[in-house]
Amino acid sequence: MKARSETRRPSFFWLLAALVLPIMNLAVRFRFHHPERMPQSGAFVLAPNHYSEIDPVVIGVVSWKLGRAPRFLAKASLFKNPLLGWLLRTSGQIPVERAGSKSHAALRAAEELVEKGRLVVVYPEGSLTRDPDLWPMRGKTGAVRIALERGIPIIPVAHWGTQALMPRYGKKLSLFPRKTIDVIIGEPLDLGAYRGRPLDQSSLLKATAELMDAIAALLGEVRGEPAPPQRWDPTAHGQKETGRLED
């Protein structure tokens, strides 16, 4: 597959790009670090940090600019809006319930996309980070589970500057003045120690911790400061967790 061939093929994503890109290009200047690490073919899991409600739009634009059509695991409630739900379903996005068997069904749906060689974006934190300084918090196991079960790469990615476009828990965009968002693509996470072994909870949690450490290190690189040695754990701080994928 030639570079960017996925975005050059006619698809419904062209309509989405026509609607979203003009606004994002006006509001944001993307500064990419190691864009060559984004695979141009084949299935893989893209695992970004998550600290703003606008993150999916930002990562969707990043994926498109780097030559891949993004598919997300998105909150099921978003699909209840008639127009937005139609856009999400038509573009192949996957609804995810907060918990229970339907959450596991979303994992199976994501794996079907993997079988077709698609990029699947999974936020391993499951929801907006609760870390006071916007560092990645403790992750959930869904992202590494997909990668290990299907034998595909998982690529960590971090972005910084999105909070100026829409702050955590904010609902309004700040389009002007134009913002700069740094995006750094990581090397594929080395999961060699876990492949070919039973996917017990202990192994999944260890692999997920390594993924979150990799994302935090990337974020520290673009922020120009070291990441904290430990990930923020909402349960240890008496905060209720809500998320897209369960452990």
Image (cartoon, grey):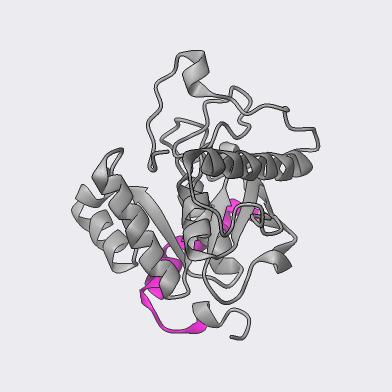
Give above or below for 54 relative to 131: below
Residue 90: where, in percent of width, then height? 28, 68
Main SS category, magenta section: helix
In this rendered view, identify the residue nearer to me: 211 or 169: 211
Q: Residue visible at 60% across and 35% down?
A: 136
Q: Is residue 37 magenta?
A: no
In this rendered view, identify the residue nearer to me: 173 or 235: 235
Residue 23: where, in percent of width, then height? 49, 57
In this rendered view, identify the residue nearer to me: 230 or 178: 230
Residue 179 visible from this viewpoint: no
Give above or below for 193 relative to 90: above
Residue 5: where, in percent of width, then height? 55, 83
- Left or right of 75, for residue 173: right
Give above or below for 121 relative to 139: below
In the figure, residue 171 lies in which quadrant? top left
Residue 220: where, in percent of width, then height? 75, 38
Q: Residue visible at 46% across and 71% down?
A: 118
- Left or right of 93, for residue 235: right
Q: Is residue 19 magenta?
A: yes
Q: Which residues are magenta?
A: 8-29
**Quadrant in the picture for the C terminus:** top left
Give above or below for 164 relative to 108: above
Residue 182 visible from this viewpoint: yes
- Left or right of 24, for residue 95: left
